[in-house]
Amino acid sequence: MSGGWNYRVMRAFDKPHPSVANTEAYYAIYEVFYNDDDTVKSWTEDPCGSPFGATMDEMVSDLAWIMTVLVKPVLDHATGKDVEPAKLLVDDLYAMLNKNTNSPSKPQTSVKPGQDT
């Protein structure tokens, strides 16, 4: 990646989501920024909003990029360090998409799972 940013799932305790008790962990998607050596440099304080785009194609591309975080380790919101392994493999993600859309094949997007831009 050499610097840049991407979406990542982070686990947090300090700013609970309204749906969880104060002592429970919650998971959300954040924008994470990297140093040139690909170590985590910083991240947004608040989770990112819903997928966004100026056009439907841009919004779908943003959603596809957000979904790629499900195959990466979970980061701790307080430290930025890996705290849990990824819960899904790329094939698991495709299977879930196919099950929920009745699509017979892998979705075609301009962003491939695991690809950082």
Image: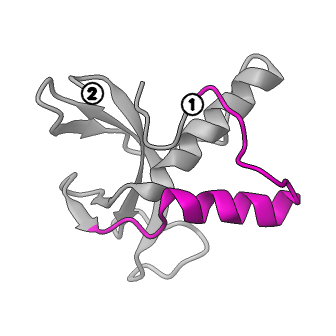
Span colored in magenta: 84-110
Residue 80: in magenta span: no
Secondary structure under tag 1 reads: loop
Secondary structure under tag 2 reads: loop
Above or below, 112 relative to 77 = above
Q: Quadrant of residue 36?
A: top left
- Residue 6 in the figure: left or right of residue 84: right
Residue 44 image point, x, y percent: 37, 39
Marks 2/1: CA–CA distance: 15 Å
Q: Nearer the viewer, residue 102 or 70?
A: 102
Residue 3 image point, x, y percent: 23, 23
Residue contact between numbered discs 2 and 1, judged by CB atoms under 8 Å: no
Residue drawn at x 16%, y 28% is 35
Residue drawn at x 54%, y 78% is 20
Q: Look at mark 1 in the image and give the residue it sits on.
A: 111
Residue drawn at x 65%, y 57% is 94
Looking at the rendered structure, the kind of residue marked 1 is: Val
- Residue 99 in the figure: left or right of residue 13: right
Looking at the rendered structure, the kind of residue marked 2 is: Met
Above or below, 93 relative to 1 = below
Residue 87 badge: none
Whichever of callouts 2 and 1 sits on the residue coming sooner in the sequence is 2
- Residue 43 in the figure: left or right of residue 115: left
Residue 65 image point, x, y percent: 56, 37
Q: Residue furthest left?
A: 37
Residue drawn at x 72%, y 29% is 59
Name the quadrant of the C terminus: top left
Q: Look at mark 2 in the image and give the residue it sits on.
A: 1
